[in-house]
Structures are given as C-alpha cells and as structure tokens.
Amino acid sequence: MIEGTLCFVVDDDEVLLIEKRRGLGEGWYNGPGGKREDGETIRECAVRETREEVGIDVDTPALSKAGELTFRLDGDPQIHCHVFRTHRFDGDPRPSEEARPKWFAIDEVPYDRMWEDDRHWLPGVLDGRTVDGTFHFEGGEPLDEADFVDYDIEWDVSFDE
Ligand SMILES: Nc1[nH]c(=O)nc2c1ncn2[C@H]1C[C@H](O)[C@@H](COP(=O)(O)OP(=O)(O)OP(=O)(O)O)O1
C-alpha cells in the first residue's frame, strides 16, 4: 500500500490549498502532499512535498498530526494517508508544475471541487480535531475516477507518532 501525506497550513482563518495540476486528483483542490519516498519519515515527506509543491517551509516539529486516512478501492487498501496541520511556515506560496496554491477562508473551502470524501473529515481537522477514517471507493482504477460509496470515521483519536 502507498504511504502518503497531506499538509494543511492554516493562517488565521484561512487554509492553503493547492489546485493539483497532475497525478491523482488532477484539477481538484487538496492540501499539499504526496507519496513517501524510501528512507524518509512521514513528517519528512510532508515537509518535502509542501516545499516542492508550493515553495514554503513548514516547521517539522510544529506539524500536528491530525489524521490517518485509508482509501480503499474495490475492497483493497490503496493509500494510507497521514494528515498534518500547522500554523507555522516560512515563505510565500508560489505555483509549481504540480500545483497552484490558493488561500481559502475556512468557511469557504470548495468541497464541490475536492475529493468527495474530504467534506466528511476536513472540516473537523480544520477545527483542530483528530480523525481516523476509512473511505471506500468502487469501480476500478484510477481511484479518482471510481465512485465514493461509503466511509467509517472515528474522531478525537490519538496517534503514536
Ligand atoms: N480520496 C482522497 N482524498 C484526499 O483528500 N486526498 C487523496 C485521496 N486519495 C489520494 N489523495 C491524495 C493523498 C496524497 O497526497 C496524494 C497521492 O496522490 P499521487 O499519488 O498523485 O501523489 P503525488 O503525485 O502528489 O505524489 P508524488 O508523485 O509523490 O509527488 O493524493
């Protein structure tokens, strides 16, 4: 199964999202993030992907673990995604080949232009809660063309790391 990250940078009442320009979820908004590479920790992955995609530096210890999400396709776990939240960053977001960054007011997050599961867990994460969720998709690869059919969420969990 793929290990991945999502990193939500919050500044006052706004959150930094990216419009993904390629790969899974192309054309949709999400947090910066991506697949973990060999030899890096999950936090290192979140920091690297945020720097690569939008050119800002987030502070590793200040990343707060906000969730673990498992995305299943036709019953098989495909991606195990670690979600982080932070208020601390350096630099101004700039676009890259992978992503166009944009700040959104937290009460104006464009859920209709995001993965369908996001509306079930991201509001709580932006509200400071922790989540452990499994999201079921059906209809074959790729995941972003499959149907979102069901989910199971536990809130206010604690994580080992
Ligand atoms: N259902 C879903 N809801 C969601 O919010 N994010 C999802 C998701 N399914 C996948 N993702 C995110 C998590 C992770 O950041 C990313 C993985 O997609 P990709 O494999 O396309 O990664 P990237 O292309 O960003 O990674 P790299 O190739 O490592 O840069 O997609």
Image (cartoon, grey):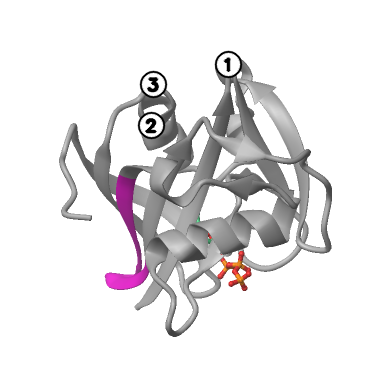
Question: Identity of the amino acid at label 3?
Answer: Asp
Residue at the disc numbered 1: 12
**Mark toward the start of the polypeptide (3 vs 1):** 1
Between circles 3 and 1, the one closer to the viewer is 1
Measured Cα–Cα span from mark 3 to mark 1: 12 Å
Disc 1 crowd, CA 10 A, few/some/many (<14, 14-19, 20+): few
Name the secondary structure under disc 1. Answer: loop
Query: Is 146 displayed left or right of 18 in the figure?
Result: left
Residue at the disc numbered 2: 125
Q: Is residue 63 visible?
A: no
Measured Cα–Cα span from mark 2 to mark 3: 5 Å
Disc 2 crowd, CA 10 A, few/some/many (<14, 14-19, 20+): many
- 13 shown above or below 49: above
Q: Is residue 79 visible?
A: yes
Between circles 1 and 2, the one closer to the viewer is 1
- Say which of 120 and 64 sits in front: 64
Residue at the disc numbered 3: 127
